[in-house]
Amino acid sequence: MNSSEAKIRIQQLTKELNQHNHNYYVLSLPTVSDYNYDQKLKELESLEKKFPEFADTLSPSQRVGSDINKEFQQIRHQYPMLSLGNTYNTEELTDFDKRIKKLIDEEFEYVAELKFDGTAIGIRYINGKLDKAVTRGDGAKGD
């Protein structure tokens, strides 16, 4: 793929992914499977890496999807709530395990749970009592 083809493809993917984000986060009407969305996002990330001159700070690859609802009060998270990476095969899990083992120099184990689509929330308790429950929102603040 040459530079001009990459620029066009990056623009196409950006427009398409922005529309999918709007459908999912604003309208609550996803029009593509998570897997297909993730594959398009990976393609965009790969192209932006190969052709950094066309990368944009507003790219879907640089932002966390947002489910902020203007009808609710916005609260800033104490720590950012970022998106988790996805894996779709054994090789990706093995690569992840190797990266973790390089970072952690002690015994550890993994715990895995099924992913349920929906709203992610951060919950804070003070002295055993619920203080706040805040949606992920845009990663910096939520409802």
Image (tube, rainbow, N blue to C red):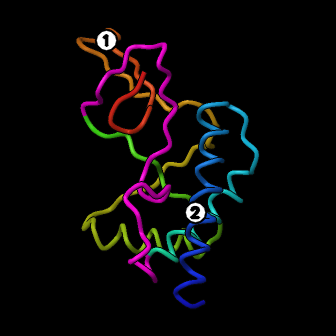
Q: Main secondary structure of the magenta part?
A: loop
Residue plotted at (24% across, 31% down): 78
- N-term-proximal mark, 2 vs 1: 2
Q: Secondary structure at mark 1?
A: strand
Badge 2 local density, few (<14 within 10 Å), some, or many (20+)?
some
60 left or right of 133?
Answer: right
Number of marks drawn: 2
**Residue beneath label 2, please?**
41
100 left or right of 3?
Answer: left
Residue plotted at (65% across, 65% down): 39
Rendered location of residue 86, percent (x, y): 56, 58
Rendered location of residue 44, percent (x, y): 55, 69
* Magenta stretch contains residue 4: no
Name the quarter where the C terminus is drawn: top left
Q: Disc number at residue 131?
A: 1
Residue plotted at (47% across, 19% down): 70
Residue plotted at (61% across, 64% down): 13
Q: Disc number at residue 2?
A: none
Amino acid type at image mark 1: Asp
Amino acid type at image mark 2: Leu
Q: Which residues are magenta?
A: 49-78
Relative vertical location of residue 69 with respect to residue 24 in this rendering, above or below: above
Relative vertical location of residue 2 with respect to residue 100 in this rendering, above or below: below
Camera-nearest residue between 130 and 120: 120
